[in-house]
Amino acid sequence: MTLRTSVGIIGAGPAGVLLAHLLHRAGIESVVLENRSRDYVERRVRAGVLEPGSAQLLRDAGVGDRLDREGLEHGGIHLRFGGESHRIDFKELTGRGIFVYGQQEVVKDLVQARIDAGAPILFEAEAREIRGIDEQRPSILFSYQGHQEWLECDYVAACDGSHGIGRATMLARGAVMYERNYPHAWLGILAATPPAADELIYAYHERGFALHSMRSPTVSRLYLQVPSGETLEEWPVERIWSALRQRLNEPLLEEGEILDVGITAMTSLVIEPMQSGRLFLAGDSAHIVPPTGAKGMNLALADVAVLAAALTERIKGGRSETMSSYTVNCLQRVWRAEYFSNFMTQLLHREPLEDDFDNRLHLAQLRYLTSSSAASRSLAENYTGAATGTVALAKSGLDS
């Protein structure tokens, strides 16, 4: 069986379903293929910080109501180190804050909008091959309900993450992959415990980095730096809570039921170019950042705002200038985010062979960041980002 559409989208993460939603609002047909179940993608715990530009992008796209009701707006973050605690006031320094709203919640809102629109999204449909990228009608071979089927389209958008066929296809066509792997990972838990602070806590400690975030007034998201290759068997519950209390300097941190736990490798990666023929990469298929800078979901949403505008301009208006420059339009923002995420990672994490001298250097830099208004402002500007996605959306007319 062969399906036909204008844009074939692989992946129902935030990038894929937002792209489908924006195209639908512009009157452009698409089909979304997702190899996991709907329940899985809506429960998958990932990033939780939205830049103000990303939040506005979702509002402009008509899917921001629940974000405004349930999202937590933060005006800054806390930096803790050497027994000290300092607040970086984003709103005072830049005039904008951030929003804590889980990636899975963004996906729920977008999937529901897709279903409400009666537009096709196929779960448990595994994309296996992309063909004809240099032809006028490329196609995607996928498995669905025990059958092999084809999706024929004008353009393919691969939003299928780091292990999907989109990246593999681009690399097979000569794309270059720039990559850095870090010697540490994050052990993350989602716990039924009230947040210990009203804003995120980034903690530098001689035993390693820790992060305290939240998802609601009763649910917290917490992370610990662990060595790369560490396993969960080495971290019983008692050890996790003890390390969190020590590194966060929160001796009264309440121990709650752990709802989710996992270890995430720390990697920086960029694919260049992000397009070839009629294939386009967006989100994690094109780039990965360490979570320290809270950029992953924001980059994905900004990518598809640019891509939706480019596809609309080409399909509706017959113009291809924006489509041709998609990679260039995205990469300046991507590399800036890579730099900031790498900076935050090196600043707050202990390397395996660091000594007391290195520790003093970390503390000196942290004290400079928290005592210099210029340094604090630079951190705040990078953390809160710019409204590039919203600008692209507005220029395309997709917010009508």
Image (cartoon, rainbow, N blue to C red):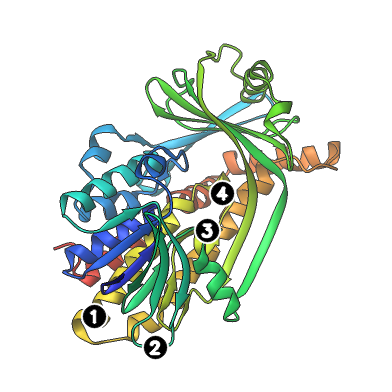
Instruction: Tell me the kind of residue under disc 1.
Output: Ile
User: From mark 1 to mark 3, how far is it between C-alphas?
Assistant: 30 Å
The disc, 3 or 2, on the residue closer to the chain's N-terminal end is: 2
Where residue 217 sits, quadrant-wise, is top left
On residue 337, which mark appears? Answer: 3
Residue behind mark 2? 135
Q: Are marks 1 and 3 in contact (CB under 8 Å)?
A: no
Helix, strand or loop status at disc 1: helix
Dots 1, 2 in contact, CB < 8 A: no
| Residue under numbered circle 1 | 315
- Say what secondary structure mark 3 lies in: helix
Residue drawn at the location 55% of the way across and 58% of the way down: 162
Question: Distance of mark 3 from mark 4, alpha carbons?
Answer: 17 Å
**Callout 2: helix, strand or loop?**
loop
On screen, residue 11 above or below 187: below
Camera-side residue of 12 and 254:
12
Sequence-earlier tag: 3 or 4: 3
Name the residue that disc number 4 marks.
Answer: 375
Q: x, y (%) of residue 287?
A: 54, 62
Quarter of the picture holding the N terminus: bottom left
